[in-house]
Amino acid sequence: MSVKEYVDNLIKNENVMVFSKTYCPYCDATKDLLNSLKCQYKAIELDEMDNGRQIQDYLFEITNQKTVPNTFISGQHIGGNDKLQAKHKSGQLMPIIKDFCN
């Protein structure tokens, strides 16, 4: 499976998908928010994958975002931690994520 197929399948098949790195504090903040909302999500730690660099390069191609976390909800690109947190603070996050939270 190519990097493109792998990433496209994750984005399509996972309700909440976070591309992350283990040492990234912004990634931790995104996962902390999702955990606090009791949301089910899948996180891929790019720094622990042999093809993590290629995955991040492909994500840049499709999102124009170079950084992590790179979050998708229901196949839609949300962006990084700042955008996810802003959506939460403005009340725009729960309507799009509520079906995936307990």
Image (cartoon, rainbow, N blue to C red):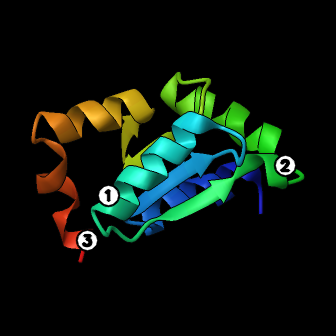
Tag 2 residue: 51
Q: Amino acid at mark 2?
A: Asn
Residue 20, compared with residue 56, is above or below; it is below
Query: Residue 40: percent from the left, percent from the top?
Result: 39, 71
Measure how far apart labels 3 and 2 are at the Cα level: 30 Å
Q: Is residue 34 left or right of residue 29?
A: left
Q: Quadrant of residue 101?
A: bottom left
Tag 3 residue: 101
Q: Residue at x 45, y 32 (%)?
A: 80
Tag 1 residue: 74
Query: Residue 95: percent from the left, percent from the top?
Result: 11, 54
Residue 11, compared with residue 91, is above or below; it is below
Q: Amino acid at mark 1?
A: Ser
Q: Residue at x 77, y 55 (%)?
A: 2
Residue farthest along the bottom direction in this orientation = 102
Q: Nearer the viewer, residue 15 or 102?
A: 102
Measure how far apart labels 3 and 1 are at the Cα level: 13 Å
Query: Residue 22: percent from the left, percent from the top?
Result: 71, 48
Q: Amino acid at mark 3?
A: Cys
- Within 10 Å of disc 2 (Cα), the crowding (few <14, some 14-19, many 20+) is few
